[in-house]
Amino acid sequence: MSRKTAPELDVSIVIAAPPNRILRAFFEPDALNAWCQVKHAVTLPRALGPYAITWPATEFRDEVLGRLGGVFRGTVMQFQAGHGFFVADVYFLPPDGDPIGPMAFEVTCTPSGDNGSSTQVRVSQRGYEESPRWRRYYEVIAIGWQHSLGALKALLEQ
């Protein structure tokens, strides 16, 4: 009997912006709204700071998860200026149904290009329990993060 591999998120993009500017965009409510359509955000880039963001519930209903939107919340365990941050005890609270979690969420920034004028941004998320809801969650967020990172790149490079 073969075991299914646990799904996880691991996406990256190169953005022509310095790491500190990119990291600010993950913590400033106006920036989060601009590139990720976040409705509210309570985030603090320091150890034990909150990382809570909300999206309005969608009209659309996913066949497994129900309406999308909801709350993504966790605790910043590590913030390193110019490099990245790590959020633990992450839960996704969809508008309908039970929370999904716990998970870990991490963003890292690595200088890219010859003169360091670009930054590779890597977003990863781990945590899993075998169920159709968890598998579907990772399918949905993989598509969402690809779109959101493209929007972040467009915002920061304009």
Image (spheres, rainbow, N blue to C red):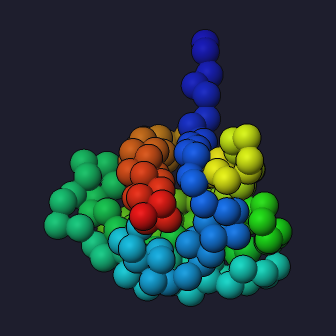
Q: Quick check: 113 left or right of 15?
A: right
In front of the other: 127 or 36: 36
In front of the other: 15 or 12: 15
Residue 111 image position (x, y, % from top left): 74, 50
Residue 97 image position (x, y, % from top left): 37, 65
In the displayed structure, 153 sits above or below 41; it is above
Q: Residue visible at 62% across and 75% down?
A: 24
State the quadrant of the N terminus. top right
The answer to which quarter of the image holds residue 18 is: bottom right
Q: Residue furthest top?
A: 1
In front of the other: 131 or 23: 23
Q: Quick check: 139 left or right of 82?
A: left
Q: Residue furthest left?
A: 59
Q: Quick check: 144 left or right of 3?
A: left
Q: Residue visible at 39% across and 45% down?
A: 143
The answer to which quarter of the image holds residue 107 is: bottom right
Residue 105 image position (x, y, % from top left): 66, 59
Q: Is residue 122 visible?
A: no
Residue 55 image position (x, y, % from top left): 37, 74
In the displayed structure, 84 sits above or below 38; it is above
In the displayed structure, 67 sits above or below 71; it is above
Q: Is residue 7 visible?
A: yes
The tally of labels here is 0
Q: Residue visible at 23% across and 67% down?
A: 58
The answer to which quarter of the image holds residue 109 is: bottom right
State the quadrant of the C terminus. bottom left
Q: Residue visible at 61% across and 83% down?
A: 43
